[in-house]
Image (cartoon, rainbow, N blue to C red):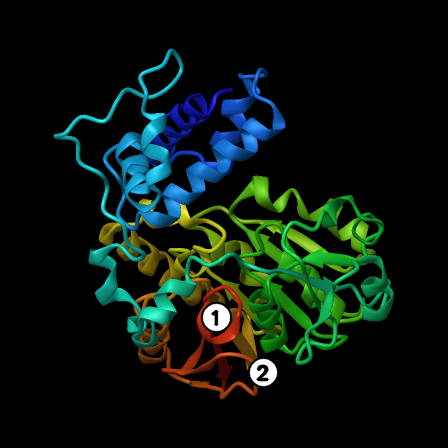
Amino acid sequence: MTPSARLQAAIELLDEIITAARENGAAADTLIARYFKTRRYAGSKDRRAVRELVYRAIRLCGERPESGRAAILALVQDDSALQSLFDGSTHGPAPIASEENAALPGIVPLWLVPYLAVPLGHEAEQAALLQRAPLDLRVNVRKADRAAVRRAFPGAQDIEAFPNSLRLEEGTAVEQSEPYRDGMVEVQDLGSQMIANACAAQPGMTVVDLCAGAGGKTLALASDMAGQGKLVAADINRDRLSRLPQRAERAGVTIIESLLLNPGKEAAALEAYNESADIVLVDAPCSGTGTWRRNPEARWRLSPQRIERLVVQQAHILDVAAPLVKPGGTLVYAVCALTNAEGRDQIDAFLTRHQGWMSKTQDAPLGRKYGQGRLLTPAHDGTDGFFIATLVRI
């Protein structure tokens, strides 16, 4: 592919990504993979170059652009060397017309700013939301120790506050490594690891992971439980939950019970666990505003209406979770979101609705106190953005 053809390919891909963001379609990575699957003529250098152009444009534009061409025109203003590639060649983009408008650059969509947690008002905090994310590993202590895993990954750095964690260079092929194949490690952002730490699971406990998904945090809880106790992984998403058994087998975990829930009927399915759980983890569906380093196009998918729907869904899940916790037990609520409505305000509302609960101050190595919980941000903590709250049933 010529440089001009690569630029046109980026425009076409951005058009698809913008449409998918508007209509809640497939993620950018999925669309890019599909695009090149039908274009076998594109070599590895072509694919890499096009992908880089696409993500440069996505990171540059906070508001969802009108078109892929508008997004690339914004990139031209940031990188004038691209202007000459609008040459009207057979596979290249048409020349730039004088009346064409470029998309506006920015980090946070303007409508979203009032929703964000107070620390996100600072420019440095916002800028860090789009920086490249590090690659963190959680060592499966049932199969290995950190020193052994470190030897397999040259350049790996210990994370002092987390004795079973390592940080690798971006782009390390973890899933092709022997430690990964043998279940010695899981790829898991340090913020996600802190959620499991906040649960403080112990051997012999009964633990319910109520939004288990594919089970990353479930496996971390199982490790803390040392293979002893009862661990229920529940979710309404069949596809995501179906990935857990294979992951558990690789990790050598045998105490997990998977439970597929029907939306709106969760309480009935979970009734047998009422007042029996030492810990219930609610890692709730959310806006993903804390994950823009990995999914920058997620900004284009948000709207006030979507956040309102998520807040209602989160409150429902918390209400389902509360009866499961036995007196003296713990409910841990977490979202990879940085909006007040999904974090601080959500917990305040829960404590208003439910008597007999109290928040617990977290003795944590990362984050800062925020409302009745703890806020982690990329700028402050070098992790994805999270709000985590620990509640105790009196």
Point 58% across, 15% down: residue: 41
Image coords of residue 104 (percent x, y): 23, 47
Kindly identify which residue carries mark 1: 333
Helix, strand or loop at mark 2: loop
In which image quadrant can residue 317 be found? bottom left
Image coords of residue 170 (percent x, y): 63, 54
Instruction: Note whether residue 178 is visible.
Output: yes
Q: Nearer the viewer, residue 249 or 321?
A: 249
Q: From the viewer's perspective, is residue 123 above or below residue 262? A: below
Q: Residues under labels 1 and 2: Cα distance? A: 18 Å
Point 38% across, 55% down: residue: 287
Three-letter amino acid code at the position of disc 1: Tyr
Image coords of residue 158 (percent x, y): 72, 72
Q: Is residue 86 left or right of residue 286?
A: left
Point 80% across, 50% down: residue: 250
Image coords of residue 283 (percent x, y): 51, 62
Kindly identify which residue carries mark 2: 365
Q: From the viewer's perspective, is residue 327 above or below residue 33? A: below
Q: Which mark is residue 357?
A: none
Three-letter amino acid code at the position of disc 2: Pro
Q: Is residue 352 left or right of residue 149?
A: left
Q: Is residue 126 left or right of residue 206?
A: left
Which residue is situated farthest in the left direction here? 99
Helix, strand or loop at mark 1: strand
In which image quadrant can residue 7 be found? top left
Q: Earlier in the sequence, mark 1 or mark 2?
A: 1
